[in-house]
Image (cartoon, grey):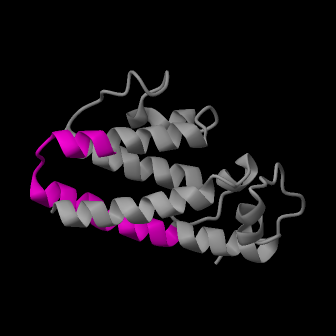
């Protein structure tokens, strides 16, 4: 079980490294699949892990609860998402959970990572490639005339 979690954690860390270069409008753009936006999809994954632990111990992360993330999407930022996943990693290391619950969370996270990869692909095809931005560590602040059609 620990191997599967380490594998998905590694994939997540690679994905988060790419996502740090996205603008707020890119993180919040509704693609019409997954949980709509990249940020909402990531928060849904973190929330599912948190529910599998049976806790709501987010007092040190943000003034809003992860379990109520849908009502706080406008106030949560990328750094909050990263902190939620660090908290999930900490809980995973320090707590024994039911294998079936964790296996379901890991499987769902892999599925959502695939959806976010598709969202990134759509962004890259509509604007200057993300690879160019990451190479020079530049963040595009806003997107004008984003051309993405729903699938």
Q: Is residue 73 above or below residue 142?
A: above
Q: Position of residue 60 (x, y in %)?
A: 41, 23
Q: Is residue 145 magenta?
A: no
Q: Position of residue 83 (x, y in %)?
A: 46, 38
User: How many callouts does the rendering have?
Assistant: 0
Q: Which quarter of the figure has residue 17?
A: bottom right
Identify the image quadrant of the C terminus: bottom right
Q: Position of residue 148 (x, y in %)?
A: 76, 71
Which residue occupies 52% across, 62% down? 15
Q: What segment carries the magenta color?
A: 89-115
Residue 50 in the figure: left or right of residue 112:
left
Q: Which quarter of the figure has residue 133?
A: bottom right
Residue 70 seen in this snapshot = no
Our reading of the magenta stretch's main secondary structure is helix
Q: Position of residue 76 (x, y in %)?
A: 58, 35
Residue 54 in the figure: left or right of residue 57:
left
Residue 31 seen in this snapshot = yes
Which residue occupies 44% across, 60% down? 12
Which residue occupies 59% across, 43% down? 78
Point out the residue furthest to the front here. Answer: 136
Identify the image quadrant of the N terminus: bottom left
Q: Is residue 110 magenta?
A: yes
Q: Is residue 17 above or below residue 24?
A: below
Q: Nearer the viewer, residue 61 or 101?
A: 61
Q: Nearer the viewer, residue 121 or 40?
A: 121
Which residue occupies 10% across, 52% down? 98
């Amino acid at each position: 079980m620990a191997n599967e979690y380490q594998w998905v954690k590694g994939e997540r860390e690679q994905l988060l490294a790419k996502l740090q270069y996205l603008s707020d409008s890119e993180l919040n753009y509704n693609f019409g699949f997954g949980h709509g936006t990249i940020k909402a999809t990531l928060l849904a994954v973190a929330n599912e892990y948190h529910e599998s632990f049976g806790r709501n111990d987010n007092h040190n992360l943000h003034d809003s609860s992860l379990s109520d993330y849908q009502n706080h999407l406008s106030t949560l930022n990328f750094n909050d998402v990263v902190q939620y996943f660090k908290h999930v990693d900490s809980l995973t290391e320090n707590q024994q959970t039911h294998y079936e619950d964790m296996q379901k969370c890991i499987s769902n996270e892999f599925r959502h990572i695939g959806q976010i990869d598709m969202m990134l692909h759509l962004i890259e095809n509509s604007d200057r490639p993300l690879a160019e931005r990451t190479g020079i560590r530049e963040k595009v602040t806003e997107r004008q005339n984003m051309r993405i059609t729903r699938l």
